[in-house]
Amino acid sequence: MENNHVITIAEGTIRHKEQVVLSNVNVQVNKGDFIYLIGKTGSGKSSLLRVLYGDIMMHSGSGTVVGHNLTTLKKKEVPFLRRKIGIIFQDFQLLGDRSVEDNLRFVLKATGWKGKKEINAQIEKVLSLVGLSNKNYKMPHQLSGGEQQRVAIARAFLNNPDLILADEPTGNLDPETADEIMQLIFSLKEENVGIIMATHDYRLIERFPSKILKCADGQINELKITI
Amino acid sequence: MAKSKKNTFKTTSVYVTASLSLILFLLLVFGSVFLQSQKVFKKYKEQIEIDVFFRDATSEAQIKKLEKEILLIDGVKAVKFVSKEDAWEVIKKDVDLENVEDLLGGIPLRNSLQLKLSGDYVQLDSVKYLEKQLLNTYDEEIMSVSYNEIQFQNINQNFYTYMLYVLGLCGLLVIIAVVLINNTIRLAIFSKRFLIRTMQLVGAKSSFIKRPFIINAIFQGIFSGIIAIIFFIGLSYLLSHYESFISTMLFSPQNLIENLILFAAVIVLGALISYLSTTLSVRRYLKLSIDKLYRF
């Protein structure tokens, strides 16, 4: 965490059901970095992200994410790791049984926020960050895909994370909305957050150029060329 | 639209509550029958009579004196003097015996005492012991002791068999209740498995995720128990108008203490089944990996 690192993985091996998905993983992400993660379906992008948010264990090698050691990570530690990370999914994964505001309130309460005033202020802050201040009372299914993703981004930002992991966040959106969402995610760099975004959408990479990591043949390599 | 989502959640709860209430209601009925059966049976047993016949030489005054002594014997609950004239009147009502009295030159019966025993003493061994005791002690006054031996022999055995059936039925109901409710609750939680997953992903601790499910489950159990009790009281009230015997086996002021114990037990059982099933189901989904979550 000192040196501004939010992710450091060295010689990492990631397995999924006894099968090696990625080996010799060497990744370093700093605050303020925006990194694309590309690769075919099944190339290990999602497995890497899952390791980063503590859903699967790294098999060997060494690494830390937002100050948590990935090789010695205990189950009880996982919620605390996730509180320092914002996760954005292709299918938004909002709590469908409650309003936008209650979705956000749930996260804050679940992560130890107490005061009503502070909670409301934080909700207001993140909703205005994603431009949804006036939709706080809506249920997720009453929102468009783009709006739902904005809520997911707002949710990811609630605990002032050091790292944002976005797993194909524009995958379910039309190109125009995808551009808007992308603009929003890209702008989060300015908040001094490290961002890793898995995507298949090369059009977006062209429009918002940044560092690219490519998963292929069980390896992760940085693409030196800009697409 | 917002309402429709909330209704889906409510409908699931309604299904669980309805199933739980029905099962608890049945348990209340059988549980009450089981508890009250012992009372009813004891009452029934205490109605069985033993006749003690006296020799002709024994005077009514002597018998009256003996009546008091016999009442003090352990296990004797009530003693009633039946003069031979009274007994003769009873027999005459049933059988045409108009000329028998003249033919025999008197009433062909003996004075007797009708004994009723306490419930615990209504068994063959006790009755035989009592008979021996009476005949030994009052040899000069008592001629014979008469009772239906087979009735005394079978009564307890028949009751134990009956109780075993009712108990078995209660046990079976509890098993059905647990399996049925467990399945219903598991389905309800299953429909929320992705919600649980999302909660985990935003950094909620397992205990935080479990808490509302468990609180809801306990309330659901208690609420179901209360509904079952209302139905049970309703049924007892209805039956009291038509079938007094069965209704005395259910809710009635005479059974208040047993009823209250049973009500408390049903509420606790409802909450316990609901709590355990919910805890196990939620824990299962909390531990499941995303791959397995989709494979259901």
Image: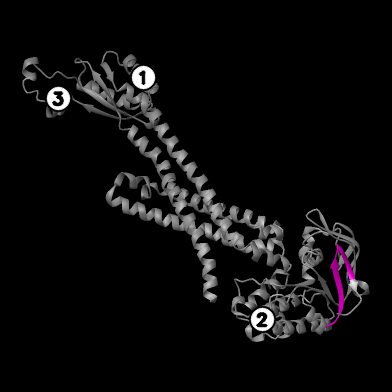
Q: Position of residue A34 (x, y in %)?
A: 84, 78
Q: Which portion, as a residue range, is magenta?
A: A208-221
Question: Closer to the N terminus: mark 1 or mark 3?
Answer: 3
Element under disc 3: helix
Q: Position of residue B224 (x, y in %)?
A: 48, 57
Q: Nearest the camera: A84 or B134? A: A84
Q: What residue type is labelled 2?
A: Glu
* Residue A46 as seen in the image, left or right of residue B188: right
> Label 3 vs label 2: CA separation?
99 Å
**In the image, are marks 3 and 2 on the same chain?**
no
Q: Where is residue A18 in the image (x, y as percent from the top left)?
A: 80, 53
Residue A147, disc: 2
* Residue A159 as seen in the image, left or right of residue B281: right
Label 3 crowd (10 A; few <14 / some 14-19 / many >=20): some
The residue beneath circle 3 is B88
Label 1 crowd (10 A; few <14 / some 14-19 / many >=20): some
* Residue in view at x 59 percent, y 79 percent: A142
Q: Which quarter of the figure is the C terminus of chain B placed in? A: bottom right
